[in-house]
Amino acid sequence: MGDNDENVRLVKTIEKLELEKKGIEKDYKDLKVELEEVKKSLERYKLIVDFAHDWEMWFRSDGSFEYISPSCENITGYAAGALIDNPKLLDSVIYPPDLEDFKRFISDSLDFVEIRQSLTFRILTLSKQIRWCEIRCRAVYDSRGKYLGQRASVNDVTRLMQALGEIKNLSTDKEYDARIRERYLREIEDKDRELVSQLMVLSNKNETLQYIKANLNEHIKTCKPAEKQMFVKMINHINSTLLSTDNWENFMMHFEKIHPGFFSRLQARFPDLTSKDLKLCSYLRLHMTTKEIAGLMNITPQSAEISRVRLRKKMKLTRKDNLADYISKI
């Protein structure tokens, strides 16, 4: 009788375990279905975020990146991976005058200090264009309420700002280009002045030597034979000095550093130009006077003027065209 009771209890235990097993299997299937639904939801969410029109970012609570959407490339020109791999790259994307405000906005948002819901700022794209953007931040929490950082949405509002008349020509980066060009031109002008001052020293030296040479030639006509030999040696020495001071290759090297590609563009446009023509063009590019050019080329001002006329003909310029201005634009 006792054995039968024990068998009954075992049967009931087995039946109970079977029922629990079926329940567990059912729960497992239900969980598996739910997990698949969650995976699909995550995939759909990621798909939506990855193909969002706006540039989406997720800043962790420490300010580092958790996620950047691929759409940032459409706005900035930089791939999301480039910004994630090099967080400092974002500093070069933000237009310099707006960088401090942008950093403060993100920092205040992460610390819940920021009261404003958005910030309008400018970015400098990979192709060096300026665009206006608006950023909005929102706190991110997990299912247990733990603070995970801030989700930031950035959208391009350049057209809107244009319509409001707040940036006018900034969309084409004209303001930025103007500043860079102005600084570049100032640097070129400073270097040109330095090069011209060096050339002026050489021109004055040549002019002095030419004056001495002319006087010696006059003295030779009336001097004694013994003195004539001495004067001829002096004239020969002056001639060799004039040739040695005309170091064209050295000048070209310095000139090309200031105006890269000038001579190649000049020769490509006018292949018949001689070496003397190229010299004349470079001196005109530096806005030197006829007298100064004559001193550098060891010729008279009249000869320098004739060279200018011949150069105008080779370039087929009209009377209305200013030779120096034309050369400066090459």
Image (cartoon, rainbow, N blue to C red):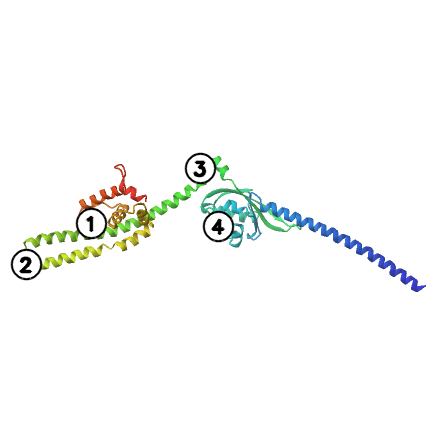
Badge 4 vs badge 3, beta-carbon distance below 8 Å: no
Residue under circle 4? 91
Q: Is residue 161 left or right of residue 240?
A: right
Neighbour tally class for label 3: few under 14, some 14-19, many 20 plus, Cα within 10 Å:
few
Q: Earlier in the sequence, mark 2 or mark 4?
A: 4
How far, Cα to Cα, is label 4 from label 3? 25 Å
How far, Cα to Cα, is label 3 from label 1? 50 Å
Neighbour tally class for label 2: few under 14, some 14-19, many 20 plus, Cα within 10 Å:
few
Neighbour tally class for label 4: few under 14, some 14-19, many 20 plus, Cα within 10 Å:
some
Front label number (2 vs 4):
2
Badge 4 vs badge 1, beta-carbon distance below 8 Å: no
Image-quadrant location for residue 242: bottom left
* SS at circle 1: helix
Q: Residue furthest front?
A: 272
How far, Cα to Cα, is label 2 from label 4? 81 Å
Q: Nearer the viewer, residue 48 or 191?
A: 48
Q: Earlier in the sequence, mark 4 or mark 1?
A: 4
Label placed on residue 225: 2
* SS at circle 2: helix
Q: Which residue type does callout 4 highlight?
A: Asp
How far, Cα to Cα, is label 2 from label 1? 31 Å
Q: Is residue 14 left or right of residue 145?
A: right
Residue under circle 3? 168
Q: Earlier in the sequence, mark 4 or mark 3?
A: 4
Label placed on residue 295: 1
Quadrant location, the N terminus: bottom right
Q: Residue furthest bottom?
A: 3
Q: Residue at x 41, y 42 (%)?
A: 175
* SS at circle 4: helix
Label placed on residue 99: none
**x and y, in percent, of residue 306 in the image:** 20, 44
